[in-house]
C-alpha cells in the first residue's frame, strides 16, 4: 500500500567460461532430490565494485526442475531501472540427460514495466523469460550482466532459495577496488574467504550440496537456520546525491538533508492551520484536529522515481494538490504540526517487514514512512496514508518494531508501540431465543479492538449491499437467514468497532434418533488442527496475539430438557490459555469461552506441544449439549 | 442450444424523447450548482460515487499517409460521495501499437476536480507532473492521470481524444459499471464507405435514440455522407458481481463494433468479414491458420511412427491426440491464430499457445485423413459469442473431429485431459467449426461430455474407544479427476499431497495410501487407504453419536444470497456419491435412525437422496447429490438454494447409539 524505498532486487552470478556444462540429472546426489521440486545445479554471482556508485554484476544459474511443482522456478525475471541496465542475456534449456534442447533468442525475452499495484508510477522495468518443457526433469540455464550507475545496496545471497529447493552449488564473489569500503552481515556460521588480487580485494561465500528444507506451517522463515549474507556500501552515490551507511545516525542525516527546506507551507495553509487550532486547548487536541484535517483532505497517491523513492515531495506541493505517498503525506503533516508549534519526526519503517537491525545500517530494511509526535506525556505515532485510522493507531504491520527516527542530529533507532493479546480483543455476546417451533432468533453483539479492529475495519467502509453479501458468505451458521445488521465505530478516535447482527435459523438443533444436539460454540470454533511434525526445522509463531471472549445464552424451546451438558474445560500452556464453561438453569444454557493466544516465537521442538494445545481447543469447541423433548 | 435467448435482452429499441439529454449540457468545466447536490438513491444509496454522465463520440478522419483512422472522444463526470470513491481520480488509458507503423495516440486530456467551498466552486486542473506514460511492453502503453484536491463531495471530470489506425474493431461502449450511472451516451458516425457489425450485450436494453444520415468531412477535399447512431441508457444501477457465472461482461449492457465491408468511390464492395463464408475464406488463406494446418512436412514425417499402421479412425485419433499433448507444453497463452507459420517449428520448440497446439493437432489429424476441423470458441471469461459473423469475439481454438457421425472435441493443452474433454474455460456452450475445404462453418454445441464426479466409499468399524478403523476408497471422474490429477502433480510429493489431504480432516490418520490410474486417463482415478479416525465420534452420558458423512459433509449452502440477477452456470454437471458402512460394538444399540429422504428440483435437474439403514450391528448411510444441468435461470436459483438447504440439514443429522447399561 505504500512504499519508501525503491526495491532493488539483486541476484547476480558470474559466468565462468570453464564451468562444466553437464546437466545430466542422474549426476545430482540423491540426498538433494529428496522432497525437492528443483535443484540449483550451479549458481555464480559475481559483483565487481568499481567505484562509489559504479559496479558490474555477472550472474549465471542452472536449475533442474524435477516435477510440475517446480515449474514456477523455470523463469528469469530480472529488474532494472534508470540506474542499472541488463545485457548479454543468454538462456538455454536442456533435457533430463543434459542434452541441449534449444537456445533462446533475444526476441524470446520480453521487456515490460514493473509497477507495484499501490503505485501510479515507478521507473522499474523487467526482463522476463519463461521456460516451458513438457517432460520432467529438465534443466534451464541463463546468464546476464548488469551494470550500475548509482548504487545504494549490493546483491544479497541466500544458500537456500526457498522451501523444497536444494542447492548443489552456489557461490557469491564480491570484488572491490582499492579505497572502497563495504560491510557485510551474514548468518552465524557462514565462512568468508578473503583474498587480495593486486590492489583489489575479493570476498567469497560458497555452499555445496544442501538438501531441501520443507515448508512447515506457522513458520517464521529460513533466515535463522540457513546461510545468507548481505553486503552494503558504506559510502553511496545515487541519482546525484551522496551519503553514508556508516551507521544509522549518518544515514538518518542523509534522509534529513534530502528533506531540508521541504516543509514550507503556503501562506493560505498556514492561516488555515491557525484557524483550525484556535480553540484547541492542549497539544494533543491540536494534533488530533490536524490529523483529522489531513485524513479528510488528502489521499494516497504513490509515484516513485529515482531519488523520489526516498525524498518526499515538498509540503508546499502537497498543500496544492492534496495527495502524496507516505513520505509526502508524513512530511506534510509534519509541516502542519510545525505551524501549530508542535515538533515531530519522520520515521523510516519496515511495514510488515522484520525489525530494523540497530547494528547494521543499510538500505533494504524499510519500505515506509510514518510520523512520530513526541508529546510531553505520551508519544503519538501517526500513519499519514490512512484516511480512516483513529489517531495514534498505526496498525499491526507498523507496531512493535525497530524503526529509524529522523532528527536534526541524524538517525536514531527507536521502537514502535506493541499491541498485546489483551489489546487485540474480540468481545462477543450472543443471545439465542428458540421459539416453540424450533426456529432460533439469534442476536450477536461483538466488539473488536486494535488488530481485530483492523481485520474487521473494511466492513465499516463498504456499502450495505456488500455488507449483507459478506455476512451471508462468512457467518457459517447453519441455515442462517440474515435479519438485520449494523457496524459502527462510535468513537472515531479509538481503534474499536462494534458489530450487531441478527439472524434467524431453523438448523441450529440437529436431530439424532429421539435426541436433539446443540453445538454450543456457535461462531468461534477451531475447525481444524495442524498435523504433528517429526524433526521440525523452522521456528514458528501465530500471526498476532489476541484475546477472544464469547458468551452465548440459549433460551430453549418449551418442553425441552437438558439431558447432557459438557464439563467445564480449562487449558493452560505457554502458547495461550483457554476456558469453556457450561451452565444450565431451567431452560437456559449459558456458554462462555475465553481464548488468549500469545504472539511469541517458539523453537521447532515445541511445535508438537503447540499442536496438542490446538487439538484440545478443537475438541472443546465442538462440545454439544444433548436435549430431549418431553413427549 | 442458444443460451443467449434465455437471458440476454439483445437488441435495441428506438426512442426519441430523452428528457435528460435535452435539458443537459455536456461542456467541459461547466458544472451546474445542483450537480453538487446529486445523491445516490435506492439500493445504491450508499454508493462510493455516481457517474453523472459518460458521453462518447466515435467518427472518422482521413490522412494522405495513413488513410482512414477513427477518432474516439470520451467525456466523463463523476461525483465522489465517499472516500471509497477516491480511486476514480486516478485514470488510466491503454493504447496499442502494432509491430508495423500502425498505432493509437492520445490527443489531449483535459481533467479537473471541482469543489464547493463556502458556496463557491473551486476548480483544480490536473497538473503537468500528474500525467504519466508507462511503456508496458512493445505493444501496449498506458497513459495515467491523477487529479488534485479530491474530497468527499468533489466532482471529477475527464475529457480526452484517442486517434486509432485500427479500424477493424472500433472502441465499444459499456453503459454500466460498479457505481450508478445517471446518463450514458455513445455516438457513432460511420462514413458511407464503411459497414460495421454491431454487437449488443447485457441484461438491460440499450436505446437507440438517433439513426440519421449526416454529412462528414474528413479533410477539406474529402467528404461524404455518414450514418450517425446514438445509443443511450439512463439511470443505470451499480452492477455487482455474482458467483457461478461465466463473466460479468456477459451482463453489462454494451456495444461492440467489427468491420464488415468497405465500399469506396469507384471501387467494388470489399467484404471483410461480412459473412461466415468470407470469414472462413480469410481463415483458410491465413498463414497462421489455414495455411499453417496445410503445411504437412512434419505430419508426413512423424505420422508413420505415431500410427504404426493403425487404421481405425477412433484409434488413430487417440494416438495423434496423445502424441500432440505429450510433446508440446502449453505456454498458458490463448489465441485463435498460431504464433508461427509451420507446425514443425512448434514441435521443435516443444511449447506453444493453445492455437499452436490445437492447430498442430488438426494438421496431423487431417494429414491422417481424419475428418478434423478447427473449432473457434469464445472462452467463459471472454463472454458469449453473439452468433453472427464476428471473428474478433473468438479468443481460442480447439479441434473438432467427426468420428462415425459423432462430434468429438479435443483440446491438447493439458496432458491430463481425457480424450473428448475440453478445458473448463472453453465450456461456453457453443463453438464454430471451420471447414477449410468447402469454406463453410457450423455452430456446434460444446456442452461437456464429462461431469465432475466423486464417489466415496467408507468401510469402518467402531470400537468402544469411539475410534473408527477401516478403509476409504475414493473414485474420481471427469472434471474432478482432471483437478485431482493436477493437484497431485503440482504437489511436491505424495507426503505433501497427503498432508494437504488431511488438512481439513481432523482426527484422520492414514496408512497405505495408493493412487491408481494416475496416468491411465480413461479409467477411474482411484485412491485407497487404511484409516483410523478419532475425534469424530462423541459421547454424552450413555449416548454415543456422530455425523455419518464425516469429512464429506456439506457444511454450508454455496447459495447464500437472497437475490439472484444472473443465471447460474456451473459449466459441467456435478455428482457426489457417498457411502459408509459402520460395524459397531455388541453393546451399542441404534435406537432410531434418521429418516431416509429424496429431494428434487421440480424439473428433476437436481436431486439429493439420503438413505439410513441398519441391520444387526452394521449401519449403512448413502448420500447422492446429482446436479445434472449446467445452466439454471435466476428463477431456478432458488430451487438450487432450497436443495442445498436440505443437503446441509440432512447431512448434519447424527447417528445415535445407546450403550447398554
Image (cartoon, grey):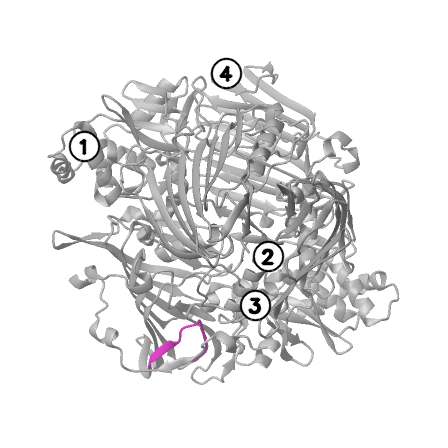
Q: Dot 4 falls on which chain?
A: A
Label at residue A178: 4
Placement of the N terminus of chain A among the 4 image quadrants: top left
The numbered mark 2 sits on a residue in which chain?
Answer: B
Q: Which mark is residue B378?
A: 3
Q: CA distance from mark 4 to mark 3?
A: 63 Å
In space, the residues marked 2 and 1 are separated at their CA atoms by: 57 Å
Q: Tell whether B504 sits left or right of A321.
A: right
For marks 2 and 1, give the one nearer the viewer: 1
Residue for badge 1: A286
Label 2, on which residue?
B333
SS for callout 4 = loop
**In the rendering, at what x and y percent does residue B271 appear?**
52, 80
Disc nearest the viewer among 4 and 3 = 3
What's the magenta region?
B194-210
Query: Real-space Cα distance between discs 4 and 2?
Result: 50 Å
- Identify the mark at residue A554; answer none if there is no mark: none
Q: How many C-alpha atoms fall within 10 Å of the one at disc 3: few (<14), some, or many (≥20)?
A: many
Point out the tag, 4 or 1, that comes first from the N-terminus: 4
Q: Are marks 3 and 1 on the same chain?
A: no
Q: Is residue A114 left or right of residue B470?
A: left
- Depth check, mark 4 against mark 1: the one in front is 1
Amino acid at each position: 500500500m505504500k512504499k519508501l524505498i525503491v526495491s532493488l532486487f539483486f541476484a547476480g552470478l558470474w559466468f565462468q567460461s570453464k564451468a562444466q556444462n553437464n546437466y545430466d540429472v542422474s549426476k545430482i546426489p540423491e540426498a538433494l532430490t529428496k522432497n525437492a521440486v528443483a535443484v540449483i545445479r550451479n549458481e555464480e554471482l559475481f559483483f565487481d565494485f568499481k567505484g562509489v556508485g559504479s559496479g558490474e554484476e555477472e550472474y549465471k544459474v542452472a536449475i533442474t526442475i524435477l516435477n510440475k511443482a517446480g515449474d514456477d522456478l523455470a523463469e528469469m525475471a530480472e529488474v532494472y531501472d534508470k540506474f542499472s541496465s541488463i545485457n548479454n542475456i543468454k538462456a538455454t534449456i536442456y533435457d533430463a540427460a543434459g542434452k541441449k534442447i534449444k537456445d533462446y533468442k533475444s526476441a524470446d525475452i520480453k521487456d515490460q514495466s514493473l509497477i507495484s499495484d499501490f503505485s501510479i508510477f515507478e521507473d522499474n522495468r523487467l526482463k522476463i523469460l519463461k521456460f516451458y518443457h513438457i517432460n520432467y526433469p529438465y534443466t534451464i540455464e541463463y546468464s546476464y550482466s548488469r551494470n550500475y550507475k548509482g548504487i545504494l545496496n549490493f546483491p544479497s545471497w541466500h544458500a537456500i532459495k526457498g522451501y523444497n529447493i536444494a542447492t548443489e552449488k552456489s557461490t557469491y564473489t564480491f570484488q572491490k577496488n582499492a579505497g572502497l569500503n563495504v560491510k557485510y552481515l551474514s548468518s552465524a556460521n557462514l565462512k568468508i574467504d578473503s583474498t587480495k588480487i593486486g590492489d583489489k580485494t575479493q570476498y567469497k561465500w560458497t555452499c555445496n550440496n544442501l538438501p531441501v528444507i520443507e515448508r512447515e506451517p506457522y513458520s517464521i522463515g529460513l533466515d535463522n537456520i540457513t546461510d545468507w549474507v548481505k553486503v552494503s556500501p558504506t559510502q553511496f552515490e545515487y541519482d546525484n546525491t551522496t551519503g553514508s551507511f556508516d551507521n544509522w545516525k549518518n544515514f538518518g542525516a542523509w534522509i534529513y538533508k534530502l528533506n531540508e527546506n521541504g516543509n514550507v507551507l503556503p501562506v493560505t495553509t498556514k492561516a488555515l492551520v491557525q484557524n483550525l487550532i484556535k480553540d484547541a486547548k492542549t497539544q494533543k487536541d491540536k494534533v488530533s484536529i490536524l490529523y483529522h484535517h489531513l485524513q479528510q483532505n488528502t489521499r494516497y497517491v504513490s509515484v516513485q522515481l529515482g531519488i523520489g523513492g526516498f525524498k518526499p515531495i515538498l509540503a508546499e506541493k502537497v498543500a496544492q494538490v492534496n495527495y502524496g505517498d507516505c513520505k509526502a503525506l508524513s512530511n506534510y503533516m509534519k509541516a502542519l504540526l510545525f505551524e501549530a508549534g508542535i515538533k515531530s519526526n519522520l520515521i523510516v519503517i519496515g511495514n510488515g517487514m522484520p525489525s530494523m537491525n540497530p547494528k547494521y545500517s543499510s538500505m533494504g530494511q524499510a519500505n515506509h514512512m510514518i510520523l512520530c509526535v513526541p508529546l510531553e506525556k505520551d508519544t503519538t505515532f501517526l500513519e499519514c496514508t490512512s484516511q480512516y485510522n483513529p489517531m495514534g493507531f498505526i496498525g499491526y504491520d507498523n507496531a512493535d518494531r525497530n524503526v529509524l527516527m529522523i532528527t536534526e542530529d541524524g538517525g536514531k533507532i527507536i521502537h514502535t508501540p506493541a499491541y498485546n493479546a489483551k489489546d487485540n480483543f474480540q468481545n462477543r455476546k450472543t443471545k439465542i431465543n428458540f421459539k416453540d417451533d424450533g426456529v432460533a432468533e439469534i442476536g450477536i453483539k461483538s466488539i473488536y479492538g486494535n488488530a481485530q479492529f483492523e481485520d474487521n475495519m473494511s466492513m465499516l467502509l463498504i456499502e450495505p449491499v456488500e455488507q449483507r453479501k459478506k455476512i451471508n458468505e462468512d457467518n457459517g451458521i447453519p441455515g442462517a437467514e440474515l435479519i438485520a445488521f449494523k457496524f459502527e465505530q462510535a468513537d472515531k478516535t479509538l481503534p474499536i468497532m462494534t458489530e450487531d447482527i441478527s439472524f434467524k435459523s431453523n438448523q441450529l438443533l440437529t436431530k439424532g434418533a429421539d435426541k436433539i444436539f446443540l453445538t454450543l460454540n456457535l461462531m468461534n470454533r477451531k475447525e481444524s488442527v495442524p498435523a504433528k511434525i517429526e524433526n521440525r526445522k523452522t521456528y514458528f509463531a501465530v500471526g498476532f496475539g489476541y484475546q477472544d471472549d464469547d458468551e452465548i445464552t440459549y433460551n430453549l424451546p418449551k418442553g425441552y430438557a437438558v439431558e447432557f451438558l459438557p464439563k467445564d474445560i480449562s487449558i493452560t500452556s505457554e502458547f495461550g490459555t483457554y476456558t469453556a464453561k457450561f451452565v444450565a438453569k431451567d431452560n437456559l444454557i449459558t456458554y462462555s469461552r475465553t481464548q488468549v493466544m500469545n504472539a511469541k516465537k517458539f523453537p521447532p521442538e515445541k511445535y508438537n506441544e503447540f499442536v496438542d494445545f490446538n487439538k484440545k481447543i478443537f475438541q472443546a469447541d465442538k462440545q454439544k449439549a444433548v436435549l430431549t423433548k418431553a413427549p | 442450444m442458444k443460451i443467449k435467448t434465455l437471458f440476454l435482452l439483445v437488441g435495441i429499441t428506438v426512442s426519441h424523447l430523452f428528457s435528460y439529454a435535452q435539458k443537459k449540457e455536456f461542456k467541459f468545466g461547466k458544472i451546474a450548482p445542483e450537480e453538487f447536490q446529486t445523491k445516490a438513491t435506492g439500493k445504491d444509496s450508499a454508493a462510493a460515487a455516481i457517474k453523472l454522465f459518460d458521453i462518447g463520440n466515435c467518427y472518422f478522419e482521413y490522412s494522405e499517409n495513413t488513410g482512414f483512422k477513427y477518432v474516439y472522444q470520451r467525456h466523463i463526470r463523476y461525483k465522489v460521495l465517499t472516500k471509497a470513491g477516491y480511486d476514480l481520480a486516478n485514470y488510466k488509458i491503454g493504447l496499442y501499437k502494432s509491430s508495423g507503423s500502425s498505432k493509437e495516440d492520445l490527443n489531449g486530456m483535459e481533467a479537473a476536480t471541482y469543489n464547493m467551498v463556502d458556496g463557491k466552486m473551486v476548480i483544480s486542473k490536473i497538473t503537468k507532473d500528474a500525467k504519466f506514460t508507462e511503456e508496458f511492453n512493445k505493444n501496449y502503453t498506458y497513459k495515467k492521470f491523477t487529479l488534485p484536491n479530491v474530497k468527499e463531495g468533489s466532482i471529477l471530470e475527464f475529457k480526452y481524444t484517442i486517434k486509432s489506425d485500427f479500424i477493424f474493431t472500433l472502441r465499444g461502449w459499456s453503459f454500466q459499471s460498479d457505481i450508478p450511472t445517471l446518463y450514458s451516451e455513445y455516438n457513432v458516425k460511420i462514413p458511407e464507405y464503411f459497414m460495421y457489425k454491431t454487437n449488443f450485450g447485457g441484461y438491460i436494453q440499450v436505446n437507440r435514440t438517433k439513426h440519421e444520415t449526416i454529412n462528414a468531412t474528413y479533410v477539406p477535399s474529402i467528404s461524404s455522407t455518414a450514418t450517425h447512431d446514438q445509443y443511450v441508457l439512463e439511470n443505470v444501477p451499480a452492477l455487482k458481481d455474482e458467483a457461478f457465472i461465466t463473466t460479468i461482461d456477459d451482463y453489462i449492457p454494451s456495444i461492440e463494433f467489427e468491420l464488415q465491408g468497405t465500399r469506396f468511390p469507384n471501387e467494388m464492395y470489399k467484404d471483410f468479414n461480412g459473412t461466415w463464408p468470407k470469414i472462413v475464406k480469410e481463415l483458410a488463406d491465413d498463414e497462421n491458420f489455414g495455411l499453417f494446418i496445410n503445411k504437412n512436412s512434419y505430419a508426413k514425417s512423424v505420422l508413420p511412427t505415431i500410427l504404426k499402421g493403425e487404421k481405425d479412425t477412433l484409434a488413430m485419433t487417440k494416438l495423434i491426440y496423445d502424441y500432440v499433448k505429450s510433446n508440446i507444453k502449453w505456454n498458458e497463452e490463448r489465441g485463435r491464430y498460431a504464433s508461427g507459420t509451420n507446425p514443425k517449428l512448434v514441435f521443435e520448440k516443444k511449447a506453444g499457445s493453445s492455437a499452436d497446439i490445437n492447430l498442430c493437432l488438426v494438421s496431423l489429424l487431417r494429414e491422417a485423413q481424419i475428418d478434423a476441423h478447427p473449432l473457434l470458441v469464445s472462452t467463459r471469461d471472454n463472454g458469449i459469442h453473439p452468433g453472427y459473423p464476428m471473428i474478433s469475439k473468438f479468443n481460442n481454438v480447439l479441434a473438432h473431429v467427426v468420428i462415425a457421425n459423432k462430434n468429438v472435441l479435443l483440446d491438447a493443452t493439458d496432458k491430463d485431459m481425457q480424450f473428448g474433454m475440453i478445458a473448463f474455460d472453453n465450456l461456453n456452450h457453443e463453438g464454430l467449426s471451420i471447414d477449410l475445404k468447402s469454406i463453410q462453418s457450423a455452430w456446434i454445441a460444446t456442452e461437456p461430455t464429462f461431469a465432475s464426479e466423486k464417489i466415496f466409499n467408507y468401510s469402518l468399524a467402531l470400537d468402544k474407544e469411539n475410534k473408527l478403523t477401516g478403509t476409504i476408497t475414493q473414485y474420481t471422474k471427469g472434471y474432478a479427476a482432471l483437478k485431482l490429477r493436477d493437484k497431485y502433480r503440482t504437489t511436491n510429493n505424495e507426503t505433501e499431497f497427503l498432508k494437504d489431504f488431511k488438512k481439513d480432516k481432523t482426527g484422520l490418520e492414514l496408512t497405505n495410501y495408493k493412487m491408481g490410474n494416475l496416468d491411465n486417463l480413461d479409467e477411474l482415478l482411484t485412491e485407497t487407504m487404511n484409516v483410523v479416525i478419532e475425534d469424530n465420534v462423541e459421547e454424552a452420558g450413555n449416548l454415543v453419536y456422530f455425523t455419518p458423512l464425516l469429512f464429506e459433509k456439506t457444511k454450508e449452502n454455496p447459495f447464500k444470497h437472497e437475490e439472484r440477477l444472473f443465471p447460474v452456470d456451473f459449466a459441467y454437471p456435478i455428482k457426489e456419491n457417498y457411502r459408509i458402512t459402520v460395524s459397531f460394538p455388541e453393546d451399542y444399540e441404534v435406537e432410531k435412525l434418521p429418516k431416509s429422504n429424496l429431494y428434487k428440483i421440480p424439473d428433476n435437474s437436481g436431486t439429493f437422496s439420503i438413505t439410513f439403514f441398519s441391520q444387526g450391528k452394521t449401519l449403512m448411510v448413502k448420500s447422492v447429490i446429482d446436479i445434472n444441468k449446467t445452466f439454471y435461470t435466476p428463477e431456478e436459483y432458488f430451487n438450487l438454494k432450497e436443495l442445498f438447504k436440505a443437503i446441509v440439514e440432512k447431512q448434519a443429522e447424527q447417528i445415535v447409539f445407546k450403550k447398554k447399561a
